Amino acid sequence: MMRTILSLLAALMLWAMPALAQSSGPLRIEITEGVIEPMPYAVPDFVADGAAGAEFGRNIARVIASDLSGTGLFREIPAQAHIGRITSFDSPVQFADWRAVNAQALITGAVSIDGSGRLVVRFRIYDVFAGQELGSGLQFVGTQDGWRRMAHKVADQVYSRITGEGGYFDSRVVFVAESGPKDQRAKRLALMDYDGANLSYLTDSSSIVLAPRFSPTGDRVIYTSYETGFPQIYVLDVASVGRRALPTPEGTMSFAPRFAPDGRSLVYSLTQGGNTDIYRMDIASGTSTRLTTAPSIETAPSFSPDGSQIVFESDRSGTPQLYIMSAGGGDARRISAGQGRYGTPVWSPRGDLIAFTKQSKGRFHIGVMRLDGSEERLLTASFLDEGPTWAPNGRVIMFTRETQGAGGQAGLYSVDISGRNLKQVPTGTGASDPSWSPLQN
Amino acid sequence: MVLKAKGMTTNGAKMTYLSKTLILCAGLALAACTNPNRFDDGGGAGLGGAGGLAGSAQDPTSAAYFQQAIGDRVLFAVDQSTLSSEAQATLEGQAQWLMTNRDFTAVIEGHADEQGTREYNLALGARRANAVQEYLISRGVSGNRLRVVSYGKERPIEICSDESCYQKNRRAVTVLAAGLGS
């Protein structure tokens, strides 16, 4: 039953997994009156083996701290409070020094540059109060300019070992970068790390572009562009930035694409004669199959992680609501039952929840519900929130929030599926329609 | 014919589709083309201004006349694509004009206000544009002179977040062009 309540409860259950329980369980998040007390941790600058790594040692520790504290589940004990000093990666840790500042977890590491000029990052995670290492030390090797990714990988390991959940820090987000006023807004596709670093652009802003979506491996992006004057779906190779239009019949509009879990096909909306239905396309052959045939609007399809079902939005009942059908089409069952209008459903990568946009009483919300529509939880409320996308571990949702009025601007926000830790994602420019990549390899 | 949609400002004409029309017109160098400048803050009604009106609203065969005297747009109720009697009257005029001025083709642009998701609004704008297209066809305009496109909520003409703006944004606009599809 714990799994059915709040997001983090499930995570917290896993804190008591056998491995940790046997270590007398000092690493544990306490819930007091429904509020999670973040776990205090310390991450001293990584020890630089040789002068070349000094700056990396500090920067990597800072990115790890940003990742962990950014979850709201961890709280850093700042360096100025530290009593202990880590001067050698391989020397025994003086746990008393870290217990004294109440750091429950300690992350130590070392950076060096190898003979080929590559950056080598080693790290260990300690359960301070148990006085022992948590899991085994690991080493990552990569290019020097990939140091942020290596820091994210360390943070993913920490998060994963302590929560029992998969991490999500070594991931990217593709989104629409916006500039200019509301009535002549310029839009182009942009790519960044999940935390806003390493921003780059994938298209120029000569045409309206909408709603990019990552492929299951993160190598491609599908999106809608008005390049021809009419909305049409394109597939873009992230590495080469090469793109091509996917074939759709003359005189139609196509939009709202999403990849199938196999990465070889997609579902999308096609409008013909004013009627919008859902189709599936095999990318290699360009062959489309129609999945819905109602005279109502059917749009925003999203696959279940196993590829067997599709959740989508339809106004067949008179207002936009959420439905689930087989991946082959056919009968659909309505799952949204509350008052209001529902849209842009997205299946969780864990398969357990549907995230959605809800419009009710003049406000917009991002919410989650179970597959049968039960246990609806609204996580946000504002003038305009829409377009949720899931973190790779299914625990965090990113979405678009647009402010009200003539000067309204769009930005990206993230929130836990518990509704906690709502915060803006730095993008440096107006931003909308995020799509979160899978964890990178 | 490829229409290049540039989301830029052209002599104060704010809309993408205006820019598109300008490019098309320039390419065909047709005198009948027009830069309506209808959202120009200056409200310049005269000829020969920046981007000047090639056709005069006094000339009943001009696109300017179509836009200003006939009316190039119809408005819709929230979430609706049904044509009000007022909208039908405007479209009657559009149909008659298009039947008389057969050199013109048109792209019917459907739009929605910002109250709604991006995807739903795209589909809703398509419904609205289609309702206008079907009406014009039912009044005798050849279907191969008409194309539809939906901008959803991407191109509002009024930018406030009140019903006073929303009602003007829930629209279908018949944008004239020359020779499209020919």
Image (cartoon, coloured by chain):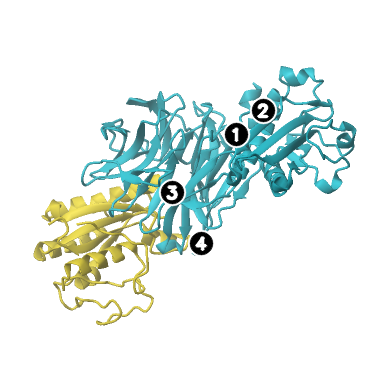
A221 versus A201 height, above or below: above
Disc 4: CA contacts within 10 A as few (<14), some (14-19) or many (>=20): few
Task: Judge depth for marks 1 and 3 and give the one in front.
Answer: 1
Q: Residue A405 carries which label?
A: 4
Q: What is the three-letter code of the residue carrying label 3?
A: Gly
What residue would you read off at disc 2?
A11
Picture coordinates of residue A343 (x, y %)?
44, 40
Separation of residues labelled 2 and 4 (CA atoms): 40 Å
Tag 1–tag 2 contact (CB < 8 Å): yes
- Looking at the rendered structure, whether the residues under marks 1 and 2 are on a common chain is answered as yes
What residue would you read off at disc 1?
A395
Displayed quadrant of residue A34: top right
Separation of residues labelled 2 and 3 (CA atoms): 34 Å
The color chain A is rendered in: cyan
Q: What is the three-letter code of the residue carrying label 2?
A: Ala
What residue would you read off at disc 3?
B116
B24 versus A325 height, above or below: below
Chain that appears yellow? B
